[in-house]
Image: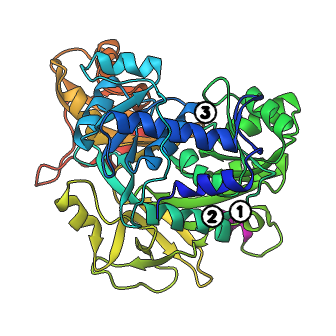
Amino acid sequence: MNIGIWLERTAQATPDRAALYLGREAVMDYAGFDRTAREVAGALVEQGVAPGDRVALFMGNAPDYLLALYGIWYAGAAAVPINAKLHGAEAAWIVGDAGARVVLADAARRNALAEQNVPAQAVARGEAVAEVATRAPEDLAWLFYTSGTTGRPKGVRITHRMLVAMSLSYLADVDEASGNDATLYAAPMSHGAGLYAMVHVLRGARHVCPASGGFDEAEIFDLARHHGRVHMFAAPTMVKRLTAYARATGAPGTGLRSVVYAGGPMYLADIIAAVEVFGPVFLQIYGQGECPMAITALSRADVADRSHPDWRVRLASVGRAQSVVEVRIADETGAELPPGTIGEILVRGDAVMPGYWQNAEASAKALKGGWLWTGDLGRMDVDGYVTLQDRSKDMIISGGSNIYPREVEEVLQTHPSVTEVAVVGVPDPEWGEVVVAFVVSDGPLDETALDTHCRAHIARFKRPKRYIATDSLPKNNYGKVLKTDLRTRLDV
């Protein structure tokens, strides 16, 4: 089925219910949401977009994002949401790899793509399509690009079935949703926040985009107080910022009903403090692009509980398997390990991807024996709670955004002064992790020059926060850089 029909059904059932907001201002009701999505679909069809084609979205958070997303689905195409924080060159590569037939972008990002000779257009309207295009459950709905260890992103094929499974699992395992709720998009709609749009469309909730287009503590508190019963998705660093703001200003967080956190390590002290300030409004999920938002969930009750003998251990976990998947802790052969034993986290079920976009080698590596090998290490206790121990990959999660060292290293290697470079992530109380680059250069280390070079080639959030000059990089007998040794240097 086409996930877009949930909008059609909600519009039929509650056409006058408010749907889209920009800040406090109502933009349109569900009847208008459905009608405009049909007009966006019509404009795409007029440009030759057919079922199965890809349409890229390179936009900041705004009501137009949802209009474009559902217009794409109404036309039978697949959306390719691109992180709005990416550099134009990075976005251009994704557009090309996806084979996007049309690129929809806001003004700032149209200019960024124009510098890369990639044409893009604003969200336009045409003659409304009469019918929502028919799609099979296994058809591509969302092509999600996640950074890869090769330095180039991989396109995760997210099907209509996966989105349905993920959305229904939200209702079963994460939280309730109703037409009385408002979902607030303070995190990027190209990622977790946007993936939760579907379940809130199904339930007829209000969709609120901050007028600022991003994350601003004062604005979030104001919108929560104004709209009431607010749900939002947040990275752990956002939760920490909200807690600090509330403590500094005395803001009570009135109107915040549910805050789902994920996307990076949440320090135990931080979530304890957040619950002390806001009460039982927090829930946690664990997922990957390859199994979006749907591997495990830690319930509102578990996050708020302080009476169970193991409450601290459970609060440090990522919860239990969601209903639509099976989760296993396995050894290198895929054999299940006993409770409490550390191994790789494997998952299978209707929320798991069928594979990567045009990348058979990576697909075969990730999908083995019917399971998705997540690359994350963890353990499961006898009650089914999964605790992440470490990442077997070198991915850095900073402020909820994924950063792969190889990608940063490849950019720095192109600077004429750099001989060798190795990038690692180190813990940071504000961002979760920050990027540190160890650089071997043929002269004095010029941090300003290296920072300028990075800004010209990759997104700002991927730049190293520190550059450390070194005469050589520690390596094993096979020439592999020993990043553990580098991290040890930072502990000194």
Is residue 217 shown left or right of residue 119?
Answer: right
Determine the secondary structure under disc 2.
helix
Magenta stretch containing residue 315, yes or no? yes
Asked whether 394 or 485 is in front, the reply is 394
Q: Which residues are magenta?
A: 311-317
Label ID, residue 63: 3
Disc 2 from disc 1: Cα separation: 6 Å
Q: Nearer the viewer, mark 3 or mark 1?
A: 3
Whether pointer 2 and pointer 1 mark residues with C-beta atoms closer than 8 Å, the reply is: yes
Kindly identify the amino acid type of the residue bearing the numbered disc 2: Tyr
Q: Percent position (x, y) of residue 82?
A: 40, 37
Residue tagged 1:
175
Q: How is the image coloured?
A: rainbow
In the rendered picture of this protein, how many numbered marks are placed on residues?
A: 3
Asked whether 420 or 213 is in front, the reply is 213
Label 2 Cα neighbours within 10 Å, binned few <14 / some 14-19 / many ≥20: many
Which of pointers 2 and 1 lies earlier in the amino acid sequence?
2
Residue tagged 2:
170
Asked whether 306 or 222 is in front, the reply is 222
Residue 66 visible here: no
Magenta stretch containing residue 139, yes or no? no
Kindly identify the amino acid type of the residue bearing the numbered disc 3: Pro
Is residue 245 shown left or right of residue 117?
Answer: right
For residue 101, which quarter of the picture?
top left
Q: Residue at x 60, y 53 (%)?
A: 8
Label ID, residue 190: none
Label 1 Cα neighbours within 10 Å, binned few <14 / some 14-19 / many ≥20: some
The residue lying furthest to the left in this view is: 478
Q: Nearer the viewer, mark 3 or mark 2?
A: 3
